[in-house]
Image (cartoon, rainbow, N blue to C red):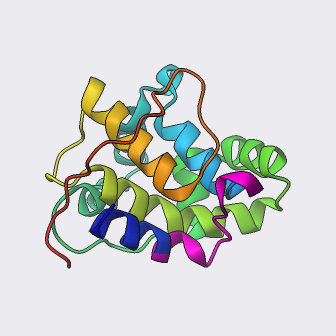
Amino acid sequence: MGMLSDALRRVTGAFGAASPQAGGNPVLNQVLNMINDPKTGGLQGLVDRFHAQGLGSIVNSWVSTGQNQAISPEQITHALGADRVQQAAQASGTPASAVAAQLAALLPNVIDKLTPQGSVPQGGALAQALATLKNTLGAAATPGAPATPTTPQTRSPR
């Protein structure tokens, strides 16, 4: 699938993103669920949450076409809420501190790859980007999300 799949495999490889037969990375699955959750506004809602918690410049760097700013596990917990991190920890069978650290590594890169044009995709474009991402990484399918691979759009390497 080209540059997108190569970059995402490098990003998630350290966190155990596995083949579809192995069920994928449980924390990555939680990230994809957060991004695809209509109850929280999906990707745009997630971006808005970071803005509301005073982390707008950080999340904007992930969406833009420039370099991604780093985020700490503590900032992730602040932005998402300790309850949300704990829920992800329980769902993934991973300690909350490890989930926060993995989210700090995964979210910037996943959001970056879902926003290749420097803006948050809406509707069908987001669904296609998520489907491509899931198929590329072998993550578990999210109910209601299309599972057909699409041709990803890529931006210049950073």
- Residue 30 in the figure: left or right of residue 86: left
What is the quadrant of the N terminus in the image?
Answer: bottom left
19 magenta-colored: yes
Would residue 23 be visible to someone looking at this image?
no
| Occupied quadrant, residue 120 | top left
Q: Say above or below: 58 vs 34.
A: below
Q: Quadrant of residue 128?
A: top left
Q: Quadrant of the C terminus?
A: bottom left
Nearer the observer, 39 or 155: 155
Residue at 37 percent across and 56 percent down: it is 55
Left or right of residue 156, residue 72 in this image: right
Q: Position of residue 82 (x, y in %)?
A: 69, 48
> For residue 118: magenta?
no
Residue 78: percent from the left, percent from the top? 57, 53
Q: Name the foreground residue: 18 vs 43.
A: 18
Q: Residue at x 47, y 39 (%)?
A: 35
Number of labelled discs?
0
133, above or below 35, in the image: below
The span picked out in magenta is 10-22
x and y percent of residue 101 in the render? Answer: 63, 70
Does residue 24 appear in this view?
Answer: yes
Please tell me which residue lies in front, 153 or 107: 153
**Looking at this view, is 88 or 113 the one in front?**
113
Vertical side of 64 occupied by 35: above or below: above
Relative vertical location of residue 86 with respect to residue 9 in this rendering, above or below: above
Q: Position of residue 29 (x, y in %)?
A: 63, 48
Residue in the image at 78% along x and 59% along y:
96
